Image (cartoon, grey):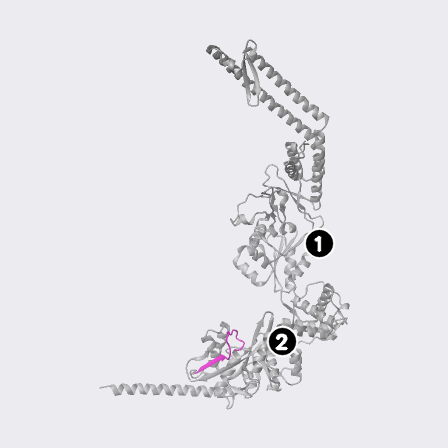
């Protein structure tokens, strides 16, 4: 039976037939331009890009290396190229409320044109307004106003002078105001002369002085009124002249942008503000040595900057809808920011310092983000959700939202947003956010799940060859020969863990291609051959297998106990898989079982010491179910079986060793030795059926390495579940040993098949009379359990008789 169940070498791995690859090198293969192996995800993405309703944003889920971002860019580009280019977005000054800049929307490309027009307008104003105000007409008009003022002021002062003379007071004007001198006999009195006057005369003069002072105040009020009127007339003159200088420039722009009401309204506001602040443009005669002159000039330049246009988003170079891939999605990189600048020791900002975020640039198109990066940046996820929910983009300070900073800042007018967001992440993040954030399911209704494997068929193999060709072209590698591509295909099956599948983690394939090209370069080869691919695989494994080699050395030195020849009762070689980063390898472990009289059932030492995971504990409990179903239909199961993984110090989980543990128990009960040169893996159910496990390839290679270190005898091998045959992707060394008859692989479906291979004895089937054939494993186990039961019954009767006898002896 052992020979009949053994697997032939051709079933130990998928072998790619080079004859099915219709090319000599990848130079003859057209590069791949489509996504392969992801039909479900591709359809989901296509639907998500087609659906324009609210909330139909896309979450692309899959493991690293499945080509999500690459496909996202390609799929979005295909759709975006045929869509309309979105408008330009501009921020301009709000002259009524500078803290709330206004938004202007212009067709793509016109934003920069409008900015240029406004720059030219300011330059024209800076040039023409000083000319107008330096002209003869303006000076004459201004002189006429000033002459009118001087004449009127002179008349007021002349009337006041006459009134003062009538009161005998000589008016004197100083910088502090009016001072009157009394006049006596046509001569003004000095203070000494005034003091010598009689008291009555002094009182009379004081009365006259008071009356003249009142007249002086009235004259001053009249002059002030004239000054106000003059200033108003000068201001009106400046406004008329300024409007004359400004009006035709702005009117030309209003005609040019007459189809855009918001722009026309802004130009009208510019005209009003220029006229209102016309002095900022008028020529000044400043002293060049004045240290404040430079400050004044800079302030004038700053005033004129308020008429500039901040083109936030310029889409003039686009040919379709924008596609933005934001690799660092911080809050500010997504929603934009208001920057600050230190001027003369003071922090300032204005509308020209508003900077766009990725959502601004992607508005009207598509934004691709990495979900993990969004979640790990403070405020980014909440900011993104707020924009998608409100469909408006507010630029706000993150510190103010969290109450960490209170600073006067701008509040720009929000921009309406129409953007399709594509999030790229893994399934864990999707399900976590889906369960804990109620907004997520409303905003990301399209789930594109990228698989890690695809069917291994001729069509997909051809597409994989096309992928190799496209990678060669993109990365500028040497072309691969047909046999080398065939080995790449075989490597793709190993990565998938199945002979029937090919991996879709194309980043791993690209790594292999680049490394094989590097080894071809070392050899000075013009093309990449089969041996270069094999070397790349071997060298990569060597870079990672330090710990695997250390364990193998410990097995070879006898520090870790394992037998690869002989036979022993209650002892079997189990197999486990260890991982170091992305590298996995198999590790044999000695599993022992001791059985004896008792009622404790199967005792798992790892569980008792809390070194067992839940899956392993469940697997051990299943053994009790199997033993009870098989041997305890007519009598109770009186058994204590102690199970353990020898030299295990870091815990164990998984049920892949449950069949191995059952073989050890059956061997101990039957007293039949197990062949130590056979390692076992596979879980078992309560019906005795062997179930598939993971890591079959790594487990076989791990035991083969130990046998190789200790010496291959031609008897060694591994027993695996029958369902795992398709999962075998063994390396060349193991397959060569199988071909030479030095190593063997046996697939089994039941415990009965496995115990026969391990012991060489038939398992036995229960006959009509309820007994097993003599000499079979089940017969020996059943016999031992019957002896346990009989012994336990006998011990129970003896104890009862002893107890009863003791009672009679003590009776009176």
Quadrant housing the N terminus = bottom right
Q: Is residue 207 above or below residue 497?
A: above
Cα separation, mark 2 vs mark 1, equals 44 Å
As helix, strand or loop, the secondary structure at mark 1 comes to loop
In reply to whether residue 272 is colored magenta, the answer given is no
Determine the residue positioned at 73% across, 71% down.
522
Q: Position of residue 289 (x, y in %)?
A: 66, 35
Q: Position of residue 113 (x, y in %)?
A: 71, 43
Give the magenta part as a residue range: 639-657
- Extreme-left residue of the structure: 812
In the picture of the structure, the residue carrying the numbered disc 2 is 726
Magenta region, mostly helix, strand or loop? loop
Determine the residue positioned at 47% across, 79% down.
624
Answer with left or right where residue 455 lies relative to residue 588: right
In the picture of the structure, the residue carrying the numbered disc 1 is 81
Residue 742 occupies quadrant: bottom right
Residue 20 occupies quadrant: bottom right
As helix, strand or loop, the secondary structure at mark 2 comes to helix
Q: Is residue 282 above or below residue 438?
A: above
Q: Earlier in the sequence, mark 2 or mark 1?
A: 1
Which of the pair 141/362 is nearer the observer?
A: 141
Disc 2 to disc 1: CB gap under 8 Å? no
Answer with left or right where residue 84 lies relative to residue 5: right
Determine the residue positioned at 67% across, 56% down.
76
């Amino acid at each position: 039976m052992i020979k009949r169940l053994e697997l032939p070498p051709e079933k130990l791995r998928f072998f790619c037939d080079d004859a099915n690859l219709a090319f000599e090198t990848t130079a003859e293969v057209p590069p791949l331009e489509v996504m392969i192996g992801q039909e479900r995800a591709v359809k989901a993405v296509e639907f998500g890009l087609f659906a324009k309703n609210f909330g139909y944003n896309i979450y692309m889920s899959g493991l690293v290396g499945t080509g999500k971002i690459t496909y996202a860019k390609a799929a979005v580009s295909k759709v975006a190229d045929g869509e309309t280019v979105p408008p330009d977005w501009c921020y301009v000054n709000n002259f009524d409320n500078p803290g709330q800049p206004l938004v202007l929307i212009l067709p793509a490309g016109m934003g920069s044109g409008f900015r240029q027009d406004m720059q030219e307008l300011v330059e024209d104003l800076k040039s023409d307004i000083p000319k107008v105000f330096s002209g003869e007409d303006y000076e004459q008009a201004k002189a006429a106003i000033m002459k009118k003022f001087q004449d009127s002021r002179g008349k007021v002062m002349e009337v006041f002078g006459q009134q003062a003379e009538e009161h005998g007071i000589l008016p004197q004007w100083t910088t502090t105001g009016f001072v009157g001198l009394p006049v006596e006999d046509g001569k003004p009195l000095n203070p000494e002369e005034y003091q010598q006057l009689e008291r009555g005369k002094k009182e009379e003069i004081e009365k006259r002085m008071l009356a003249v002072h009142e007249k002086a105040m009235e004259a001053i009020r009249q002059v002030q009124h004239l000054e106000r009127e003059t200033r108003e007339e000068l201001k009106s003159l400046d406004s008329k002249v300024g409007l004359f200088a400004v009006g035709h420039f702005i009117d030309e722009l209003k005609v040019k942008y007459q189809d855009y009401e918001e722009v026309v309204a802004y130009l009208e506001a510019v005209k009003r503000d220029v006229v209102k602040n016309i002095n900022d443009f008028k020529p000044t005669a400043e002293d060049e040595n004045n240290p404040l002159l430079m400050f004044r000039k800079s302030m004038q330049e700053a005033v004129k900057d308020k008429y500039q246009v901040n083109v936030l988003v310029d889409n003039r170079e686009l040919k379709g809808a924008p596609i933005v891939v934001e690799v660092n999605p911080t809050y500010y990189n997504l929603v934009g920011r208001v920057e600050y600048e230190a001027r003369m020791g003071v922090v300032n900002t204005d509308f020209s310092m508003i900077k766009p975020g990725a959502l601004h640039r992607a508005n009207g198109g598509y934004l691709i983000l990495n979900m993990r990066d969004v979640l790990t940046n403070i405020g980014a996820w909440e900011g993104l959700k707020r924009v998608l929910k409100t469909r408006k983009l507010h630029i706000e300070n993150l510190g103010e939202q969290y109450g960490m900073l209170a600073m006067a800042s701008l509040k720009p007018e929000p921009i309406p947003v129409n953007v399709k967001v594509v999030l790229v992440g893994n399934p864990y993040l999707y399900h976590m956010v889906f369960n804990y954030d109620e907004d997520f399911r409303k905003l990301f209704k399209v789930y594109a799940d990228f698989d890690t494997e695809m069917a291994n068929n001729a069509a997909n193999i051809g597409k994989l060859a096309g992928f190799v060709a496209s990678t060669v072209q993109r990365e500028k590698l040497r072309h691969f020969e047909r046999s080398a591509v065939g080995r790449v295909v075989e490597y793709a099956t190993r990565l998938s863990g199945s002979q029937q599948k090919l991996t879709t983690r194309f980043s791993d394939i690209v790594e292999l291609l680049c490394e094989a090209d590097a080894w071809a370069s070392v050899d000075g080869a013009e093309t990449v051959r089969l041996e270069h691919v094999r070397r790349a695989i071997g060298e990569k494994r060597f870079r990672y297998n330090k710990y695997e080699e250390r364990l193998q050395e410990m097995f070879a030195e006898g520090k870790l106990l394992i037998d690869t020849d002989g036979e022993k009762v209650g002892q079997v070689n189990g197999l486990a898989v260890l991982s170091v980063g992305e590298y996995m390898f198999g590790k044999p472990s000695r599993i022992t079982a001791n059985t004896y009289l008792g009622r404790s059932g199967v005792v798992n030492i790892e569980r008792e010491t809390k070194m067992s995971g839940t899956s392993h504990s469940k697997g051990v409990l299943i053994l009790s179910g199997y033993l009870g179903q098989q041997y305890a239909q007519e009598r109770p199961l009186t058994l204590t079986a102690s199970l353990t993984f020898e030299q295990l110090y870091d815990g164990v989980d998984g049920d892949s060793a449950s069949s191995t543990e059952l073989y050890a128990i059956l061997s101990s009960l039957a007293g039949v030795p197990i062949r130590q040169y056979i390692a076992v893996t596979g879980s078992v159910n309560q019906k005795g059926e062997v179930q598939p496990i993971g890591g079959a390839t790594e487990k076989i290679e791990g035991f083969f390495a130990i046998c190789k270190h200790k010496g291959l005898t031609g008897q060694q091998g591994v027993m695996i579940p029958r369902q795992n045959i398709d999962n075998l992707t063994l390396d060349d060394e193991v397959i060569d040993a199988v071909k030479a008859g030095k190593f063997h692989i046996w697939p089994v479906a039941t415990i009965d098949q496995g115990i026969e291979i391990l012991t060489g004895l038939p398992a036995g089937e229960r006959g009509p009379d309820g007994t097993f054939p003599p000499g079979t494993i089940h017969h020996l186990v059943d016999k031992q359990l019957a002896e346990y039961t009989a012994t336990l019954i006998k011990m129970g009767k003896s104890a009862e008789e002893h107890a009863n006898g003791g009672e009679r002896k003590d009776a009176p």
